[in-house]
Amino acid sequence: MTKFRAAVAVLAFSAAGAVGLALDEYYTSEAIIPVPGDVPTLGFGSTKGVRMGDTTTPPKALRRFISEIKTDYEGPLKKCLTGQLSQSEYDTLVKESYNAGAGAICREIAPKFNAAKTEEDYAAACDSFIGWRETVKGKSCRVRANDCYGLVVRRKAASESCKKS
């Protein structure tokens, strides 16, 4: 079955995508280091300008979360994605850019979606999340002792959610 796809310019990060991302990121009222060697994180995964000791409330964190998605992730993605995407593909790209950065998605993943012509091409582009950027500070997250195996789980889930109709 062929998915409905639309020009990226008319797509927007869905409410379901935002809720899923917020649940993936969890909420913290105080800045934390989520995995050893990572940067301070606050609210629903915000890192921009966050310092240890910073605090937030759920309403402030939600406003920041939505604002960052629109400006820091959707904005750059809309510039580098040139083809048509399904809602699940677009949501996955936004979610993973929130994790790894829009620049990384634009350089390393978007070209695969931009070149996709067939359902098989789109499925292969979705599968490119598996194994992508599964290291933290040079350590493989596939090694559970490195305390970042959640990234491996996240990338597999990204591939699966990307392919949903």
Image (spheres, rainbow, N blue to C red):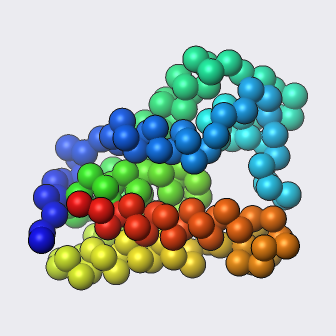
Count how many numbered circles sit on residues in the image.
Answer: 0
Residue at 51% in and 70% down: 156
Of 135 and 21, nearer the camera is 21
Q: Is residue 91 visible?
A: yes
The image quarter containing residue 133 is bottom right
Which of the image's four quarters has the C terminus? bottom left
Q: Position of residue 107 (x, y in %)?
A: 47, 68
Does residue 93 lie above or below 156 as drawn? above
| In this rendering, position of residue 30 left or right of residue 9 | right
Of 10 and 76, nearer the camera is 10
Does residue 104 lie above or below 94 as drawn? below
Does residue 7 lie above or below 64 as drawn? below
Q: Position of residue 97 (x, y in %)?
A: 51, 54
| In this rendering, position of residue 145 left or right of residue 99 | right
Q: Position of residue 6 (x, y in %)?
A: 16, 54
Which of the image's four quarters has the N terminus? bottom left
Residue at 48% in and 31% down: 66
Residue at 62% in and 36% down: 44
Residue at 30% in and 76% down: 123
Q: Is residue 77 visible?
A: no
